[in-house]
């Protein structure tokens, strides 16, 4: 089979690395016949992620989007509710909100963290929302309940979680973290995804470690954890042979075959993080005397440097950089088109997204695969 790793003529944006026990565990799984949603690797992977992140419970799913969907459901997000989130995110954040038949409301991001701004969140809530006698936070404009806040740790850079958490508590809003991109990233020594009530991580092929496809829900709440496991396994009442389901559940459980790959990847995570940091520092040195800014980890945080990012001077410089690199065998890409510009979210309420638009016109992701040889 043709190698798809970077060649001297082409450098991809991010490719997975399989340097450990991946083949061994995957073959073992095939030999065992337990390739589907039951098997020892799923349990071992959940335990491994729980230990690594410090979250009391971790429940593995088929992908990050399903993990996010279930996390929002467990946060109580229901039809007609609102979820405060950032417009500068990957589409899956908003898809998960829509799967709950809820409405996103867009809050601005910070230029430093590239993630949800606590100042923008507070301004929005102070101006448009109130906690009513029923204890819920109501949006006075739409007359809908603001059920959850869903910040995203963009490219692995943690948002300012303490400030956001404090505001959410004040307004009785559940904090759910979209930690899809931030495995290995810390906020004040704590792993991202462990401060909110619930969080979701992705193990897509482009993430720091991969399950082929996979996700995980994190929570410290025992009751929620049990419920996540129940509804992600078709809400089947455990029994040796009988098939009885007590509600409409989801077939979202991570297959053992994917977990086999994932657990081998998890073993390599510490090494990957070191190499990624090294690469990021080299980019930082390279950018030091140029008229573009390399994005570094915000105060009080440690980033996994999943996708290295530069801020160009202008939309023109962003276009020039994208054109030059992509025409010369170096894959780069702009940040996602902000959600408030997409047809399906255009009518959603939002604050003035000054930083979101500013960053969308300037950010460029540069090649970020783990480079094993120095
Ligand atoms: C911010 C964000 N949220 C959610 C997801 C969804 O993860 P998945 O692709 O595993 O469904 C991703 C990654 O793809 C992501 O980058």
Image (tube, grey):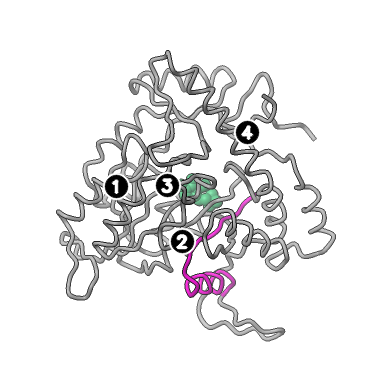
The answer to whether 31 is drawn above or below residue 346 in the figure is below
Task: Kindly state the secondary structure of the residue where label 3 is placed.
Answer: loop
Nearer to us in this view, 97 or 17:
17
Coordinates of residue 210 in the picture (x, y in percent): 63, 47
Residue at the spot of label 1 = 346
- Quadrant containing the N terminus is top right
Residue at the spot of label 2 = 69
The answer to whether 122 is drawn above or below residue 102 in the figure is above
Residue at the spot of label 3 = 188
Magenta segment: 212-234
Q: Is mark 3 within 8 Å of ligand 1?
A: no
The answer to whether 58 is drawn above or below residue 230 in the figure is above
Q: CA distance from mark 4 to mark 1?
A: 37 Å
- The residue positioned farthest toward the right in the image shown: 31
- The residue positioned farthest toward the top in the image shown: 289
Residue at the spot of label 4 = 370
Task: Kindly state the secondary structure of the residue where label 2 is placed.
Answer: helix
> Is 230 within the magenta?
yes
């Amino acid at each position: 089979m043709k190698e798809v790793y970077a060649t001297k003529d082409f450098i991809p944006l991010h490719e997975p690395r399989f340097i450990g026990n991946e083949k061994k565990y995957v073959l073992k799984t095939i030999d065992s016949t337990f390739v589907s949603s039951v098997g020892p690797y799923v349990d071992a992977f959940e335990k491994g992620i729980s230990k690594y992140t410090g979250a009391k419970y971790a429940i593995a799913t088929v992908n990050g989007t399903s993990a996010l969907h279930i996390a929002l459901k467990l946060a109580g997000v229901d039809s007609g509710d609102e979820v405060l989130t950032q417009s500068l995110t990957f589409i899956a954040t908003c898809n998960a909100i829509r799967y709950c038949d809820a409405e996103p409301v867009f809050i601005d991001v910070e230029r430093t963290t590239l993630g949800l701004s606590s100042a923008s969140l507070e301004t929005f809530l102070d101006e448009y929302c109130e906690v009513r006698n029923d204890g819920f936070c109501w949006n006075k404009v739409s007359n809908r309940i603001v059920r959850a806040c869903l910040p995203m740790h963009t490219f692995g850079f943690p948002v300012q979680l303490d400030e956001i958490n404090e505001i959410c508590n004040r307004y009785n809003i559940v904090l759910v973290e979209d930690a899809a991109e931030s495995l290995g990233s810390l906020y004040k020594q704590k792993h991202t995804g462990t401060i909110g009530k619930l969080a979701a991580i992705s193990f897509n092929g482009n993430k720091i470690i991969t399950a082929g496809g996979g996700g995980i829900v994190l929570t410290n709440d025992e009751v929620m954890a049990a419920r996540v496991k129940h509804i992600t396994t078709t809400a089947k009442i455990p029994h040796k042979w009988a098939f009885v389901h007590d509600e409409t559940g989801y077939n979202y459980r991570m297959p053992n075959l994917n977990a086999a790959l994932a657990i081998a990847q998890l073993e390599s995570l510490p090494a990957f993080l070191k190499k990624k940091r090294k690469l990021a520092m080299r980019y930082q040195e390279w950018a030091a005397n140029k008229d573009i800014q390399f994005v570094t980890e915000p105060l009080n945080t440690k980033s996994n440097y999943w996708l290295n990012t530069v801020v160009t001077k202008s939309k023109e410089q962003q276009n020039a950089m994208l054109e030059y690199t992509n025409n010369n065998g170096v894959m780069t890409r702009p940040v996602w088109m902000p959600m408030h510009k997409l047809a399906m979210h255009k009518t959603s309420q939002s604050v003035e997204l000054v930083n979101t638009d500013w960053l969308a016109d300037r950010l460029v992701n540069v090649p970020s695969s783990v480079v094993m040889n120095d």
